[in-house]
């Protein structure tokens, strides 16, 4: 409809331009009055005529007063014969200017083609474009059920291989077998092995699920169809199932090939999940995917790959053997993997000689591959903004904080009193963390506002850890309350700056009691079952599987953990107050303390 309106406006503008062009040939002039021949002779004899224009059979007159007249003579009659016939003396005509216009050849282009045929052609062109748009809309309606999957054939785009994917070694080993199946299926079928029908990539956002699927297609050098799960679901019931059928029909014509469905949970959500979980169109689409993957017709040479970060909500029928035979877990990268990922994303970026990617990897625990790519891009932007020809370590370290907390808010001007409160608050966090044996080492303390934080303290673990002990939780909880304790000790009252710390401390203490079974009173069990409801937005509901009396014990244990850690933080603040003062004064002077400067205070 939009194209039709645009074409109509274009043709209307062209029509107006042509109408203006034609109007140039018919400029409005003063109309002359028609008179008879005898009246003409009378004007001539009275010497009132100034000019005579002879234009074939038409005689135009202009009087001395400026009036215009005309009359017609016979075709073969000349003006001189007419004057002789009415006995007009020659001396009268000598005072009149007589002009004879030569007979012009008829211009067929201007008189016929331009005024008649050209507008007709414009009208025909408009009708043609209008009907073509209507015909195209009708064709789109018939193609509504076709799959929107994009196809990448071998050689069309630069190949992505396993060399372009750092880390995830176990996942790549699993997928190498899929590549071997696609390259040389006889090697496996000779032993009675069947090619896996489906491979499900599971992992946190940004761990490289989509990139790994592209690498499989690049290694196998086979056609690759990719589509998002949300592109199947439409407003009309049955369209999604039709698109699934069309997708698999296209794939079967290009065997061997790979079909990749990104964000599978958009269409593969568990059926019959309750309030907000039922959707007829989505369930029909899911049923069609189930049939296509493992129905009556075998799909030899067709591998379906999918990615999701929500395996807990997928339908059990999708996860059974015969559909998604393999589930490959992509973990967050460790320090070695992060270093390899940084090497990949630093390609094409001129790094300074003193940049240590190992050091950067150690400073980025918990970063996914996407976070590291964003980190290197932000560092390149920052270096370009500062007019540097290379990316230095300073830009990369600043970009880590930008990715973690957000950009610096230099326009956020604080009063001296507020700066002092923030300095003592962050000094309290850093001081308590430094004197607790199970806290991560303090890497940086700053009172420069960044993102939503008025100040921040960054702690980084020295080694990768996959398990956390109760003592580590308690020390981290104590460090979290260090800023709150410092404010109360120095100023005698509390500000709103500790609100986020209290929220984090409460969540941490609640997990200790309800999820990790670390309460001595309640014992080794969990409390509460979490369920996801989709109704007017995303909502997490918790079903209580304990009594009201147990709820009181849970509240008491949460308060007990928080209060004991708070008292411990206060004791450290009071006993080490001289160091607290030194840290706060340094922060007020320099605004930022790196690890070396921070440790010098204690040495």
Image: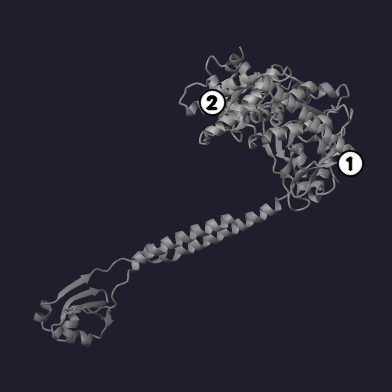
Q: Is 222 placed above or below 88 here?
A: above
Location of residue 488 with respect to 109 vertically, above or below: above
Residue holding disc 2 = 588
The residue most toward the left is 91
Front-lying residue, 286 or 495: 495
Residue 447 % position (x, y):
57, 28
The quadrant the N terminus occupies is bottom right
The residue shown at (48%, 61%) is 12
Measuring from the top left, give residue 409's x and y in whole percent: 54, 34
User: Which disc, if any, is residue 548?
Assistant: 1
Horizontal side of residue 522 vs 223, given as left or right: right
Image quarter where the C terminus lies is: top right
Disc 1 element: helix
- In-image side of 345 versus 261 (left or right): left
Left or right: 45 in relation to 411? left
**In the rendered image of this protein, does residue 506 appear above or below residue 68?**
above
Quick one: label 2 or label 1, which is nearer the N terminus?
A: 1
């Amino acid at each position: 409809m939009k194209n039709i309106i645009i074409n109509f406006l274009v043709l209307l503008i062209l029509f107006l331009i042509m109408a203006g062009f034609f109007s140039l040939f018919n400029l409005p002039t003063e109309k002359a009055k028609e008179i008879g021949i005898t009246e003409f002779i009378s004007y001539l004899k009275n010497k009132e005529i100034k000019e005579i224009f002879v234009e074939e059979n038409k005689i135009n007159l202009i009087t001395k007063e400026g009036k215009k007249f005309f009359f017609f003579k016979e075709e073969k009659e000349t003006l001189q014969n007419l004057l002789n016939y009415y006995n007009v003396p020659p001396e009268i005509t000598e005072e009149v200017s007589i002009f004879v216009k030569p007979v012009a050849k008829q211009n067929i282009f201007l008189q016929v083609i331009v005024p008649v045929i050209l507008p007709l052609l414009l009208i025909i062109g408009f009708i043609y474009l209008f009907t073509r748009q209507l015909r195209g809309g009708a064709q789109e309606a018939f193609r509504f059920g076709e799959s929107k999957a994009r196809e990448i054939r071998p050689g069309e785009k630069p190949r992505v291989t396993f060399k372009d994917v750092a880390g995830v070694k176990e996942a790549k080993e699993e997928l190498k077998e899929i590549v071997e199946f696609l390259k040389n299926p006889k090697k496996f079928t000779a032993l009675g092995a069947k090619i896996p029908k489906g491979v499900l990539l599971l992992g946190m956002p940004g761990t490289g699920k989509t990139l790994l699927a592209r690498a499989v297609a690049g290694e196998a050098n086979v056609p690759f169809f990719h589509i998002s799960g949300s592109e199947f679901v439409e407003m009309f019931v049955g369209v999604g199932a039709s698109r699934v059928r069309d997708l698999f029909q296209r794939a079967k014509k290009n065997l061997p090939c790979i079909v990749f469905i990104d964000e599978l949970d958009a269409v593969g959500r568990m059926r019959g999940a309750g309030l907000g979980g039922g959707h007829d169109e989505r369930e029909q689409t899911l049923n069609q995917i189930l049939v296509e993957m493992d129905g009556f017709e075998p799909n030899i040479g067709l591998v379906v790959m999918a990615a999701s970060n929500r395996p807990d909500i997928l339908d059990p029928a999708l996860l059974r053997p015969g559909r998604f035979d393999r589930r490959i877990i992509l973990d967050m990268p460790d320090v070695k993997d992060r270093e390899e990922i940084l090497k990949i994303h630093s390609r094409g970026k001129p790094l300074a000689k003193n940049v240590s990617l190992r050091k950067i990897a150690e400073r980025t625990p918990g970063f996914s591959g996407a976070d590291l790519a964003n980190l290197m891009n932000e560092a390149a932007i920052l270096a370009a903004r500062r007019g540097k020809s290379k990316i230095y370590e300073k830009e990369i370290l600043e970009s880590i904080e930008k990715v973690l907390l957000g950009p610096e808010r230099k326009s956020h001007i604080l009063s001296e009193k507020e700066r002092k409160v923030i300095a003592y608050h962050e000094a309290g966090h850093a001081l308590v963390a430094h004197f607790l044996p199970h806290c991560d080492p303090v890497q940086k303390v700053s009172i420069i506002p960044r993102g939503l934080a008025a100040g921040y303290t960054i702690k980084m673990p020295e080694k990768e850890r996959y398990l956390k002990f109760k003592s580590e939780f308690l020390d981290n909880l104590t460090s979290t309350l260090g800023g709150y304790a410092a404010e109360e000790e120095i100023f005698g009252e509390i500000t709103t700056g500790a609100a986020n710390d209290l929220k984090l401390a409460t969540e941490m203490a609640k997990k200790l009691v309800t999820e990790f079974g670390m309460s001595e009173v309640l014992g080794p069990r969990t409390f509460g079952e979490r369920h996801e409801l989709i109704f007017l937005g995303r909502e997490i509901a918790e079903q209580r599987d304990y009594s009201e009396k147990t709820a009181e014990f849970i509240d008491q244990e949460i308060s007990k953990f928080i209060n004991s850690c708070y008292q411990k933080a206060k004791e450290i603040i009071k006993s080490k107050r001289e160091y607290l003062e030194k840290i706060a004064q340094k922060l007020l002077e320099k605004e930022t303390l790196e690890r070396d400067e921070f440790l010098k205070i204690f040495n």
